Image: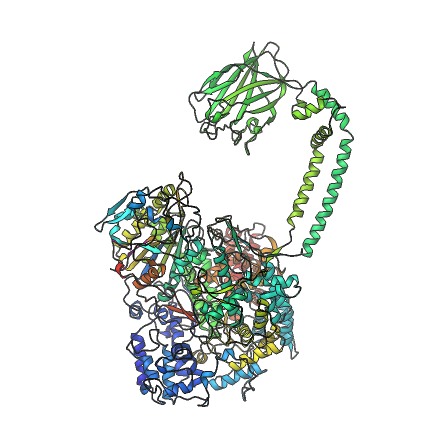
Amino acid sequence: MKVAELRMRWPAGHGGCPVSNVQPMHSFAPHSFAPPSWVIFLLVLACCVDVTTAHADKPPEFVRDVLPVLQARCVKCHGPQEQRGRLRLDSWPGLLRGGITGAVLTPGRSDLSALFGRLVSDDHATRMPFDESPLSADQITLIGRWIDQGAVSTVALTAPLETQPHWAYVAPVQAPLPAGGTQGDARSPLDSWIRHRLDTERLVAAPAAMPARVLRRVFLDLTGLPPSIAETDAFRLSWQPDAFERVVDRLLASPRYGEKWARSWLDLARYADSNGYQADQFRSVWPYRDWVIDALNADMPFDQFTVEQIAGDLLPAPTIEQQLATGFHRLTTCNVEAGVDPEENRVNQIIDRVNTTATVWLGSTIACSQCHDHKYDPFSQREYYQLFAYFNNTPLEVKGDGIQFDFVGPKLSLPLSSQNAARRSNYQDQLEQSQQRIKIRRRELLADIQSWETRQIKRLAMRPQFHPLHVESFTSQGGASHTLLADGSVLVGGTRPPVDVYTVTVRTELTGIRGFRLAALTDASLPGKGPGRHHPERPNFVLHEFTISAAACRDQATAQSVVLHSAQADFSQANFPVAGAIDGNPKTGWAIAPQFGKSHRATFLTREVVGNTQGTLLTFVMDQHHGASRTIGRFQLSAMTGDPATLHLPAEIITVLSGDRQTRTKMQQEQLEQYYLSEDAMLTKLKQRRSSIQQQLDKIQADSTLVMVEQETPRRTHILRRGNFLDPGAEVTAGTPRALHPMGSGLPANRLGLARWLASPENPLTARVTVNRWWAEIFGRGLVETSEDFGSQGEAPTHPELLDLLAREFVLGGWSAKRIHRRIVTSATYRQQSRVSVELLQRDPRNVWLARAPRFRLPAELIRDQALSIAGLLANNMGGPAVYPLQPDGIWRHVGRNAPKYNTSRGADRFRRGVYVVWRRSAPYPSFTSFDAPDRTSCTVRRSVTNTPLQALTLLNDPAYAEIALALAKRIVREAASVSLEKQLEYGFRLCLTRLPEPREVAYLVELFQTQRQRFITEPGRARDLLGSRDLSPAAAAELAGWFYVANVLLNLDELITKG
Amino acid sequence: MDAMHTIQNNLARRAFLRHTSAGIGSVALASLLAETAQSQLLHHAPRAKRVIFLHMVGAPSHLDLFDYKRQLQQLNGQLCPPSLLEGARFAFLRGHPRLLGTRYRFHRHGESGLEMSELLPHLSAVADEIAVIKTMRTEHFNHAPAQLFLHTGFGRFGRPTMGSWVNYGLGSENRDLPGFVVLITGLVGGAGNSMWGSGFLPTLHQGIEFRSQGDPVLFLSNPAGVSRSDRHQVVESINRLNAIQLEELGDPEIETRIRQYELAYRMQSSVPELMDISREPEHIQAMYGTRPGQVSFANNCLLARRLVERGVRFVQLCDQGWDHHGSVFESLPKKCKQVDQPIAALIQDLKQRGLLDETLVVWGTEFGRTPLLQSDRSRPGRDHHKEAYSVWMAGGGIKGGVTFGETDPLGYFPADNPVDVHDWHATILHLLGVDHEQLTYKYQGRQFRLTDVSGNVLSPLLA
């Protein structure tokens, strides 16, 4: 008798209200007080109490009922290792013998039996278990009843129980099928065991479920997706006696099968895309996830599945797939924060590998013996480190310089996918063509170089000349003073206004002016030598606008502004190009950071030739308003005459051109050609094209994935005292626990040997633990409820013979998962109705005996997968890097360097199955977290199944689900266009729930649809907000909005997110 | 049958927190019952009903706030004693570092004369309410493991946080709000969501973040175009259809689902109302220094009060930005300015409402900072320090105006009374009426508890 499981729900309320207040119908009124949620707790609580009485007529039995309790709570002090008070409680003879104070058991009289009395004693000094929490009320009641009813043991009194190991460490045996156990439509030995137990519990198996419900159930169990309407119709109308089995076989062969079953394996493997801890950077290991899906789809025998993941790298001539399968144990978290000890990290990773291996394959809590011998199970600390030794030969996975650390460790480069190989060859072809065009263009151009040279030489004769201008007046708007220096430059001094406008006038006799030059010069008097006046460390300036006007000296009223173009400077600061100084835009300007302490020159060409024969008055205005005195400290102005065509020619090119062609060196010739070619716009464009193709090509990198490799020289392994990596004790060598089957002779003493030992048919645990997990995934609860713990502290199996039957079938049937899955889902037990009668709720509230099919909520990923599928959005492409579906802003905001960004996927990737969704350990996908997904920082065997208001909010409001609801609405409108409203609703209903709706269900939905449609007709603006589209007519928009609400309701139904 | 009767009485009297493999302990169940019943089911009478845990993420310097060391001041700038470096590991410090004293004046405050830095003028005014532990120590000097250790008592992933243990053990007093709420300013610390995770406890005990920007609770707002009355009709339709299934299938889980949809609908108005601090009176806003509509620690302090007022069991505030490797004397005053006034206001406000007696306010961080200089002397900073640091508690059951433990003359190691994180956990649970050795959860064959295999209640701090 155990306290019945209560499914967890939030929040925990309090108060007191009789159970009878629970009404079957709930009219919902927002402002009225509904009965609080704790009512449910009381209801279930009441059921728990009833469990005890329901079985009161069935006498407890020693081995089945009492011994497990004694083993769980008493044998630590009264067992094989210690016999305090000379009492031993793990054996029948020991119990009869009693201890130092005499007998402990008086059959028929719990009040005279110390075995009972010490459990309920009020005195702390005598109450057992000593100094620990007492046994549960149910356990105490059980032992009391067992004694009162005669202390029966069906095991022969002489059987030396003390030598009998824990059931789970004994190989499964084939028990003869039970007599009876044939009630109802039992189809297989599986059903026989279940029905046999129902007989003894005096329960009756439920009848078979309706075809639509069982079809949906098996689709969800095998593929995680619901059946289509066509598939449902085909099944309903089929008269073949094995129609169901045919469906099962089709589903087992579907690629969706591997995607569904990978989810739970990836929980065990703690599969995630990031390291965990501070920064929580990404790692590439998704090929491992794809390997799991492929292996499950191929029904890879589980022994091979095991060996390849634990030690694929050690197989002879391992294939790429066998190597990447070892990613399983590279999925441990890794800390790369400053100052981390790589060795400590490595030890932590190995501890995780040992513990995870023990949990996944042995259903064992060997983790307890990391610091000391296991208190309850037969594992010593020494044996823990013997297992540790198998994993101790891999390299460090953290490297650093003492401060900056990175996640490293072995990676495997994978061959290109066929798709990427095709893309690569396509780019290579393009690159080849591009190369060819460049060659041709070069040849064309070089054929013409002579005439270009001649032209340039001719122009050089008229090359520009710069004439320093002598400043006549200078004014600073900000009040700075100035000095005219001998070279004609102006040195600004005095006050340093934050912003300034310089106005400079100059008279010149020059004519034929084609441009001007502004030199910003350094000077010892300036902060940091200048040229700007800002700050000694940053003597920058920003010249926002440089304008010139020209007037004839005789008639200054003729002043006209000089239009400037083609600004060039020897240097411009990033984002402050010199062109900004003449673009008329006051926000842009010329600056020179970080080239401080140097003079800089800017040249501007004029559109018209400037210069009056009678003299010209030039007025220069220099607007510098960036602030904080970013103004020019010293400058010189020059006018330019001559042909500007050669202005841009670099000095060395001018040298080459001016020199004698005969004596030109080869290098000079090349220099000239390079320059000449660089002037050609078409060639430049061709080269740009080539480099962009090259970039695309470079992006096609082979994917890599994390793998295990063995070091050449093995490490020595020591027991770590109290689990502390700095405190090594005795040296140990690799070995497996003595309590389990022996290591096969001839197996190597490395990971491969361990892997083969785990997957050996002699292993009493691997097969049981594995089939039990599958059973739990299908029935919501394992035959051993504690599917992570098959030790003495775990629960005993409810149907031990059935567990062994399945385990044996698994091994003897070639370790085929699909065979076991088929066996389970084709059973009559699986195909029962899930209805919970009041009687059943009282007698077996947790459905331990399976007198009905289970009902429980789907896991997080499947809720989303199913919704996408129903809405017709689900993208079926498999594999590849993680995808990023819609999530709210501000979920990824963690401390650390270059933290990854969440870039929401576009297109089909937005709608792929949950198994492909990016898993960042510090912040997993939030709607998955709402539905109990773990963070995958450690091995998870059982997820919680909660029922919370946050789940309701997620399905009602998550923008991702709103998007899905809209798609479903559109699908209904599109695919059921020309039928009656009722038929349309029926169509939508069947898409979601497979079954046909009842008339009252249709009536509710009709009412909802019509009310909402009417509202949107009267308020057309709201429909546009809701649908995010303005293309629809008001009537069509109101119609679609109405369907949106229907879809919203359907996607939130308990039945939809429940497998029942 | 008499024996049976005895057992049941016995068990009722000797209430215990024990989890069964099925999932929930008797006190966890008890919290669902009337409040009066609950006190009987606790291990002892609780001194506090609720906790507000203020986690300064990144680790502020104890040497500049609570732990003044005269000798460190005298030796400021000198090379540190080499003995401190033997076998020591640091995150950043290398070579032979120099000692770094504080630049702040310390004064004694209140009747108790509790000593505090001038950086905390407001907190100084409530010095008589708080108890400072000066000898807290931890096992990890990296942020993420130390944060995990602080919250879960274990430096790696996978264990439940203190808030989730409390939520598991005691539940919420408010059926419309979660029992464990998290409020965040700045970035999330390196340990990520695991700072409020439930580890192996059922996920419903994990902390729920109430956010200052966007939806206050994820997915609380209706999608664009959906009005509250639409939402009402949708929820009503869902529940009507669910009720049909309940009638046909009889699964109580459907009943719960119906309740949760009703609750979700109520939360859509009650949570925004709760998070809207703009209606708090002017003098309260001024007291905390709140900035309604923005993300601020002061806002979160006021929200913390509003949450505990409504019966939320465990409120956790995480404020990031305390990791001062360089320029500690520029950054620390800025951070103190952000938190000093609102924390003091929180204590005063709880007190004036009569809530401080039953609300435990805990200020803590993942580790301390070295008395050794990090970075160059122009921008001095301090490295991570796990050997000794200061935390404080106030309110529910705490003796105010006391200090516990003294560090050595350099503020480096505890000179006496070292306090482990497990002791600190044990004390917090004790104040809540829970025996830390009895609050257990069976997982993988072992009865786990927050304090692992250690933990002693710090009785000198108890009022």
Determine whether B281 is above or below B399 in the image: above
Give the x, y percent position of residue B108: 24, 47
Give the x, y percent position of residue A93: 41, 87
Residue B137 colored magenta? no
- Could you tell whether A592 is left or right of A87 in the image? right
Q: Foreground: A906 or A108?
A: A108
**Dividing the picture into quarters, in which one does residue A102 lie?**
bottom left
Quadrant, the N terminus of chain A: bottom left
Q: Foreground: A949 or A212?
A: A949
Count the numbered circles shown.
0
Q: Which segment is the magenta one?
A: B391-408
Give the x, y percent position of residue A305: 60, 68
Determine whether B363 is above or below A311 in the image: above
Determine whether A467 is above or below B346 in the image: above
- Could you tell whether A931 is left or right of B430 in the image? right
Is residue A521 visible in the rendered image? The answer is yes
Colouring scheme, one of rainbow, by chain, secondary structure, one colour: rainbow
Is residue A935 visible in the rendered image? The answer is no
- Could you tell whether A565 is left or right of B290 in the image? right
Residue B397 colored magenta? yes
Give the x, y percent position of residue A55: 42, 84
Q: Foreground: A785 or B287?
A: A785
